[in-house]
Each structure stands twice: as C-alpha cells, then as structure tokens.
Image (tube, rainbow, N blue to C red):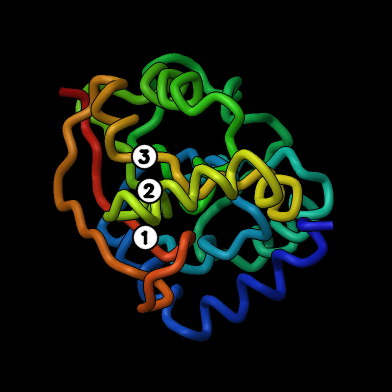
C-alpha cells in the first residue's frame, strides 16, 4: 500500500522544497555511486554529469519498476537492482560514494547497512545522507517511540521516526562533515526532523 502511495507523496514533498535538498545532497559527486533505497528514482535527474555510473538498489517491486523508467531518462548511466541494503551487489572498495536518501528509517538493520556501505567504499570514499529521524526534545522523542512501537511502521512502509542516523553513522566509524539539521516541512512534527551531510571513514 505504501509503495502505491509514495510516488504521489514524494511529488508533493518535492514540489514544496525537497527537490532543492536532493540537489544539494548530490552536488559535486563524481565517479561510481551506489544509491541505497532509490524508491521511484526521484534522485536520478539530479546527478551531476561528473558521475560515471549509478547502481541504484530498490527491493520493492513497484517502486523498482518506476525507478527503471526514471533511469532511462537520467542524465547519467543508472542501473537499477532489486538487491537490499544489507547485500549490495558491488565488490569491496569499488565505489566512490554511497547515497542514502530517506531510506534508513525503513532499513531493518541500520548498522548492517552502514557496514555494507563501508565495505563497498574505496579508500577516501564517502556517504552522502539525507534522512529524517530523532526529534530535538525529550517529549517529542517519547512520542516518536510510541509511534514506532505501534501504528507508524505498518502504515508507512516500515518507517521509524525516532532513529538517530547521525549517531548510527558515528557508531559505524564514520566522521560527519557539512552536517545540516532542519525541519521539513518547517514545522515540528514527529517526522519533520531532517539531517543532511557527508560521512567519511574516520
């Protein structure tokens, strides 16, 4: 159900400003890229020409079909795969950047996904991330945890609102740079707390 709803929801979010965040996320990328959880391929149009290849991983069949259509229109070569975040179809130390965009909230094993990203990154490679997660006040965090333990994940395709993605990246051995935190939409809701940045092996 969520896979059917997401493309229209995503288009609404993009029209209200998420497109600019996607562009900022991908700006300046070069070489070989793996995008984890590509959804319907919303990022593909924003990859710069300096990217030589994108391997886009999307395990959900309906979204993967939409992503394949977006790949055909992309300005850079994009291959869409049905693999998962925990088993990326790339050799060790083979890619320049791994992109996570609004996906780590749904991944069953965040630590495993980040370890797999580290495996495929070349020395000096980076993670680019744009994720929503844990709120900035104890009251809202408690509310997020209640949502995550009850109704929200089944309604929202496995999404968890209270995950602290920045801490997870640091726990996985990455150093965070260019971190920007903001609310999107610009109000305080359980799902509005976003972080965008770059992570390199510390």
Q: Are marks 3 and 1 in contact (CB under 8 Å)?
A: no
Give the camera-side residue of 104 and 50: 104
Say which residue appears at 43% left-offset and 14% top-offset. 92
For the residue labelled by badge 3, is the local secondary structure a helix, a strand or a loop? Answer: helix
The dot on residue 134 is 2
For the residue labelled by badge 1, is the local secondary structure a helix, a strand or a loop? Answer: strand
Q: Answer with left or right where residue 138 lies relative to residue 89.
A: left
Say which residue appears at 44% left-offset and 22% top-offset. 111
Q: Answer with left or right where residue 65 lies relative to residue 183.
A: right
Question: Which one is earlier in the sequence, the residue at label 3 or at label 1?
Answer: 3
* Residue position for label 3: 165
Say which residue appears at 71% left-offset and 68% top-offset. 7
* Residue position for label 1: 193
The dot on residue 146 is none
Let me know if residue 63 appears in the view.
Answer: yes
Say which residue appears at 41% left-offset and 50% top-offset. 133
- Calculate the distance from the C-alpha at mark 2 to the C-alpha at mark 1: 7 Å
Mark 3 vs mark 2: in front: 2
């Amino acid at each position: 159900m969520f896979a059917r709803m997401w493309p229209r929801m995503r288009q609404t979010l993009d029209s209200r400003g998420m497109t600019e965040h996607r562009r900022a996320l991908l700006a300046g990328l070069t070489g070989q890229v793996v995008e984890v959880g590509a959804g319907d391929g919303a990022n593909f149009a924003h990859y710069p020409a300096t990217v030589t290849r994108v391997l886009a991983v999307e395990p959900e069949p309906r979204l993967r079909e939409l992503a394949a259509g977006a790949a055909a229109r992309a300005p850079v070569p994009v291959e869409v795969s049905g693999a998962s975040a925990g088993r990326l179809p790339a050799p060790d130390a083979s890619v320049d950047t791994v992109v996570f965009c609004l996906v780590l909230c749904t991944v069953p094993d965040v630590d495993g996904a980040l370890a797999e990203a580290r495996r495929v990154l070349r020395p000096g490679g980076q993670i680019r991330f744009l994720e929503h997660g844990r709120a900035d006040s104890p009251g809202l965090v408690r509310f997020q945890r209640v949502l995550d333990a009850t109704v929200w994940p089944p309604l929202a395709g496995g999404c968890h609102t209270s995950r602290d993605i920045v801490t997870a990246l640091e726990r996985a051995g990455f150093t965070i740079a260019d971190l920007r935190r903001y609310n999107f939409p610009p109000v305080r809701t359980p799902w509005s707390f976003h972080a965008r940045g770059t992570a390199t092996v510390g």
